[in-house]
């Protein structure tokens, strides 16, 4: 076993990290142009420095001589490093809007991880550049950096597949990873443009339409209004934003498959089915609690229940009411929705529906075997396909580490004097990359707790395992593969 284990090689990590830096620099041109168009030249200068600095660094790093193949641990380290590096360099332009370094870093981490938690209480008075830039970071964080890299810069092959293994959904990674990335990017862009047009035509205002669409499709949740969805003037607009969020929580490769195979492909997908079922169940429970505990009428309870439950389920994090004022029943229901999340291969966070279905199958097989002869063989299956042992191991591992890190972070909050339920809500929201807040997150929050939430957001975005690989000593120390 030990003879087959290889540590990461610095040169491949630096080379591919450099190529991702070039992609990041190109993507940062968008907020640079926007800041110039809005006449925010101080911010534009900072973005210019970031673009040039990151591009130059990436240009020299990508010229390093490297082997043709990249190891799985090297691919995971590269991805973790870019998600750590991007918010750090973007924090400086964000500070130009009046934020301290800690709050600016919190904002950029929340953006790049598509979480949506914010220490900024009032965003309506912030510059338009600030509102656009953080929504753009969510769109980029949703899929942009890695997808654009695989789709445009990296050559087809094993390296592309390993760096672009964006939670491969069943057997859908056909052909090259580069082709797969292009399909996903096309779907992602079409959903975003569709949202902008629909919201704009319905009267949201074109700037607001862009912000909400970028945040919704990436299931990010940043809003240009202090009251999130409640800031929109129409219930129809609120519904469209939530529908866009649900669209982002569906495995994006399903759209391409349904285009080729018809609507039936979508309707028969187990993840989509259970996304709707679990969302409706949560909506009814939240509505019940709003009616019985919080004094809402039935019509109000149903409307807020549906919008907020599906916002939590998709991990978008938009809200139509003040979550801090809800009763315990509604909060607990939303916690379960945030923890579960959307589909594997989508932009949503959480443990993902597919993994819960796999775990349910494992429990079902355990119960079946109790009444079967010892020599009988029973295997888990899902949607007519056998669930392999490594898939079960992966699901168990991710759920286990999610629970462990959630518990650790929750204990830190409780130990520093915060309410137990509100603390759990905040931690699950961060590690599930949701963004709904029980009222704890704010500029006055202790820096240690801000750091805990930042760590949770980063851990949740890459599902923790990539970070464990990054900080595992034997990732760096040991025998290296020579080519």
Image (cartoon, rainbow, N blue to C red):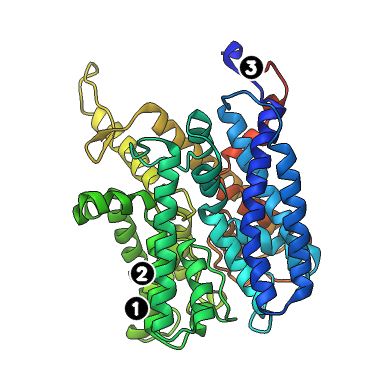
Rounded to the nearest whole Å, what is the CA distance between mark 1 and mark 3? 59 Å
How far from the left and from the top, in percent, is residue 308?
Answer: 43, 72
Q: Nearer the viewer, mark 3 or mark 2?
A: 3
Cβ atoms at labels 3 and 2 below 8 Å apart: no
Element marked by disc 3 = loop
Q: Judging from the image, what secondary structure is the residue with disc 1 in?
A: helix
Please determine whether, in this image, residue 406 is positioned above or below residue 7: below
Mark 2 or 1 closer to N-term?
2
Q: Residue beneath label 3, please?
A: 481
The residue located at (35%, 36%) in the rendering is 174
Who's the residue at 66% across and 48% down the image? 22
Of 376 and 68, the residue lying toward us:
68
Instruction: In this rendered view, identify the residue nearer to me: 227 or 247.
Output: 247
Note whether 155 is above or below 92 in the view shown: above
The answer to the question of whether label 2 and label 1 lie on touching residues, with beta carbons closer than 8 A, is yes
* Residue at the image point whose x is 78% and y is 62% from the top: 92
Q: Position of residue 318 (x, y in %)?
A: 50, 71
Return the disc, 3 or 2, that comes first in the chain's sequence. Answer: 2
Q: Position of residue 63 (x, y in %)?
A: 70, 34
Compute the Cα span from label 2 to label 1. 7 Å
- Give the number of the mark in front: 1 or 3: 3
Quadrant location, the N terminus = top right
Q: Residue at x 48, y 64 (%)?
A: 316
Q: Which residue is mark 1?
A: 302
1 and 3 marks in contact (CB < 8 Å) = no
């Amino acid at each position: 076993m030990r003879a087959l284990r290889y540590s990461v090689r610095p040169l491949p990590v630096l080379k591919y990290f450099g190529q991702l830096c070039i992609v990041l620099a190109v993507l940062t041109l968008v907020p640079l142009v926007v800041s110039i168009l809005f006449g925010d030249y101080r911010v534009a200068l900072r973005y210019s420095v970031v673009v040039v600095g990151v591009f130059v660094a990436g240009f020299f790093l990508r010229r390093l001589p490297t082997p043709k193949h990249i190891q799985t641990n090297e691919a995971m380290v590269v991805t973790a490093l870019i998600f750590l590096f991007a918010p750090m360099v973007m924090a400086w332009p964000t500070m130009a809007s009046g934020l301290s370094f800690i709050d600016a870093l919190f904002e950029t981490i929340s953006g790049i991880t598509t979480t949506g938690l914010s220490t900024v209480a009032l965003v309506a008075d912030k510059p338009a550049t600030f509102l656009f830039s953080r929504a753009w970071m969510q769109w980029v964080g949703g899929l942009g950096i890695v997808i654009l890299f695989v789709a445009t810069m990296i050559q087809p092959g094993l390296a592309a597949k390993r760096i672009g293994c964006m939670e491969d959904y069943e057997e859908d990674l056909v052909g090259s990873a580069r082709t797969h990335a292009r399909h996903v990017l096309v779907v992602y862009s079409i959903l975003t443009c569709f949202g902008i047009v629909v919201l704009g035509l319905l009267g949201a205002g074109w700037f607001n339409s862009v912000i909400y669409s970028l945040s919704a499709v990436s299931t990010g949740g940043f809003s240009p209004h202090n009251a999130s969805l409640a800031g929109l003037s129409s219930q129809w607009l609120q519904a469209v934003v939530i529908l866009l969020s649900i669209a982002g929580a569906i495995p994006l490769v399903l759209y391409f498959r349904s285009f080729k195979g018809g609507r039936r492909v979508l309707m028969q997908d187990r993840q989509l089915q259970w996304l709707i079922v679990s969302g409706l169940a949560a909506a009814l429970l939240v509505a019940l609690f709003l009616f019985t505990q919080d004094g809402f009428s039935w019509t109000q309870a149903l409307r807020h229940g549906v919008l907020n439950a599906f916002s939590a389920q998709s991990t978008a994090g938009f809200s139509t009411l003040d979550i801090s004022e809800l009763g315990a029943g509604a909060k607990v229901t939303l916690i379960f929705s945030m923890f579960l999340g959307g589909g594997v291969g989508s932009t949503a966070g959480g443990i993902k529906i597919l993994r819960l279905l796999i775990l349910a199958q494992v429990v079902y097989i355990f119960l079946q075997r109790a009444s079967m002869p010892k020599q009988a063989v029973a295997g888990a299956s899902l949607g007519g396909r056998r669930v392999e042992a490594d898939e079960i191991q992966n699901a168990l591992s991710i759920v286990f580490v999610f629970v462990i890190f959630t518990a650790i972070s929750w204990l830190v909050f409780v130990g520093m004097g915060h309410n137990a339920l509100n603390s759990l809500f905040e931690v699950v929201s961060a590690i599930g990359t949701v963004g709904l807040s029980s009222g704890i997150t704010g500029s006055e929050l202790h820096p240690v707790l801000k750091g805990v939430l930042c760590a949770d957001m980063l851990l949740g975005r890459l599902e923790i395992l990539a970070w464990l690989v990054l900080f595992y000593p034997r990732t760096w120390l040991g025998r290296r593969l020579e080519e």
